[in-house]
Image: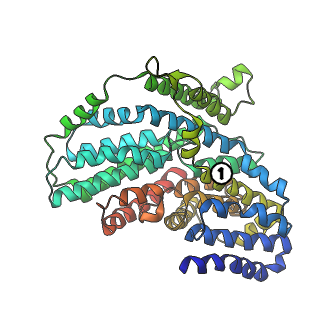
Amino acid sequence: MRTFLIRTAGPLLAVLVAWASWRLGAPAACMAGIVAWMALWWISEAAPLAITSLLPLVLFPLCGVLGTAETAINYGRDIIFLFLGGFLLALGIERSGLHRRVALIIVGRVGTSPARLVIGIMIASGLLSMWINSTACVLVMLPIALSLVDGLRASERHDRFAVAMLLAVGYGATIGGMATPVGTPPNLVFLELAKQLLPDRAAIGFGQWMTFGVPFAAAYMLFAWGLLVLLHTRHVPRDPHGAADVRAELKALGRMRTAEHLAACVFTLAALLWITGDDLSISDTFTLHGWRSFTGWKGMSDAGVALACAIPLFLIPVGAPGDRKPLLDWDFAQMRVPWGVLLLIGSGFALANGFTASGLDQVLGHALAGWHFGSSATQVGALGLGVVFLSELGSNTAVASLILPILASTAPAWGMDPVSIMIPATLAASCGFMLPIASPMQAIVFGTGRIPVRSMVRAGIWMDLIGVVLLVLFFM
């Protein structure tokens, strides 16, 4: 009944908002109504996120905002194929089993005291999440974390250690995704919207993103580790069997198989090409040229690199003689690729296009021009708090898709560079740690039944606040 009421409230809210803002002109008023409708459905999940993401294709032409063909272009943008290629690479790593070996090696190297196990599982989750889907990363790391937790005798201290380890998996996967453009969808949404809405600005490349993404993620992870140790592991005894358990699991994997070698080589090649593609200015007098400059392949984007490296996974046979077959097949891939997320990202670009075409971006820019909080630090902090709050209630991709076009048009009125405010907003969209519904990663670790809601909320409040403070320090 509740779902039905919210579904019905969506179009009614759209009509009400459009009627209330009709003085802005028909296209802008209709666009405001469409945004309100989609925001309600996205936040409440009254309809599947992917279905809500298709609404612009229907409503834009009906309301005279954009034609169907103009709207549909947004669902096939370059950045969507970057996400597709990156996810195919991640599937190759997952199917080869390489991800599990890497995670066990990292955890085994950091030591087996409770505090070290927490940072080990967090680092492993973070490093994997930089390159593979964060949700898949949590699913990979969860069994490893649970096996380490179950090495302790059942007790209250054991339960607190379990909370720390499981939250470390969720936190590590979420924070690691912020470090690279392909780590989490909001980062990709920003890169494409910046290109679309700020055509006069030089595009931010893979390596450039990592110059601020990696330090931010590293600092955030360090504070997250300190918080979990402080709250949950101070009085947990060392597990005498922890190191043995990790070594046993690693030994059970045996030597690296051909499939793992192929996945490692292809992934390493993709990562190197992503990082070294663009020119990087070291100083005013020295620029490190990327491979696009000296090869002349300037039209080869990061999406092309991802697909060029992913396609061989469907073609090169691996395995024992007599049972050689490609690492990936289409039946497996089409079941595992998150097609709904691709539609969600595309709808964000469609909304941004609709904002511009309807003139709503200018209206919002003028309306929000007076919402200036003084210094850039205060502005980033206030914006960060607002975006983090929204991300606790709805999809981080949807939040980024709604907020970033508004900021692009409003920042000049605040006397700020749009990029300098859009980047912290993008990262803030991934900083929701308080509620199980904040992200799939939070939901998965909560679904183990070992994390009380109060424990997730208590740690999550501090994580949200730490994230906002770090955003201010890094981007003020």
At 64% across and 40% down in the image, what residue appears? 82
Residue 121 left/right relative to 361: left
Residue 28 on image: x %, y %: 81, 70
Residue 390, image x, y percentages? 54, 67
> Residue 291: where, in percent of width, then height?
65, 23
Q: Is residue 219 visible?
A: no
Is 328 or 58 nearer to us in this picture? 328
Q: Image quarter for residue 155?
A: bottom left
Identify the residue at horizontal 22%, vertical 58% (top origin).
Answer: 160
- Within the image, what quadrant is residue 47 found in? bottom right
Residue at left 72%, top 76%?
14
Q: Is residue 71 above or below residue 326?
A: below
Q: Is residue 109 visible?
A: yes
Q: Residue at x 24, y 57 (%)?
A: 232
Task: Give the total of numbered labels.
Answer: 1
In the depicted structure, whether residue 371 falls above or below residue 290: below
Q: Quick check: 204 left or right of 120?
A: right
Quadrant assignment for the N terminus: bottom right
Direction from residue 432 to residue 446 in the image, left or right: left
Please state the horizontal and vertical placement of residue 248, each as a whole percent of the image. 22, 33
269 with respect to 189 (left or right): left
The residue indicated by pointer 1 is 419
Density class for disc 1 (Cα within 10 Å; few <14, some 14-19, many ≥20) is some
